[in-house]
Amino acid sequence: MAYSNRLLRRRPRIERRVLALLRGETDPLLDGHDVNAFVRLRHLARRKGLVIHEAEVPYLGDDELTLLSWLAAS
């Protein structure tokens, strides 16, 4: 499995937060509908062949960066 050299700790806080949710971390402050939206997005992204890493991976993958940019653009 190839990882990029982009460390998560160097990304803006909001990107790290969105990525954590996308990777499956939970947030007790979020409503269940919000959590379900990220679960569904993760499922659809993986079904389309995008690589979404596990929460403990300290790097930002290429597909995750693409997905973050699509979210930001929308």
Image (cartoon, grey):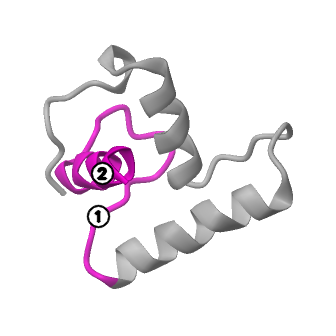
Write down the residue under mark 1.
51
Image coordinates of residue 45 in percent, x first then y, are: 37, 72
| Quadrant into which the N terminus falls | bottom left
| Among the two numbered marks 2 and 1 on one chain, the one whose residue lies closer to the N terminus | 1
Query: Residue farthest to the front?
Result: 74
Q: Crowdedness of circle 1 by 10 Å Cα count: few (<14), some, many (20+)?
A: some
| Dots 2, 1 in contact, CB < 8 A | yes
Report the residue at 31% width, 48% height from top.
Answer: 73
| Residue 66 within the segment the image draws in magenta | yes
Report the residue at 83% width, 60% height from top.
Answer: 32
Q: Name the residue type under label 1.
A: Val
Local SS, label 2? helix
Image coordinates of residue 2 in percent, x first then y, are: 14, 51
Which numbered dot is residue 64? 2
Distance of label 2 from label 1 (alpha carbons): 7 Å
Quarter of the view holding residue 4: top left
Quarter of the view holding residue 72: top left
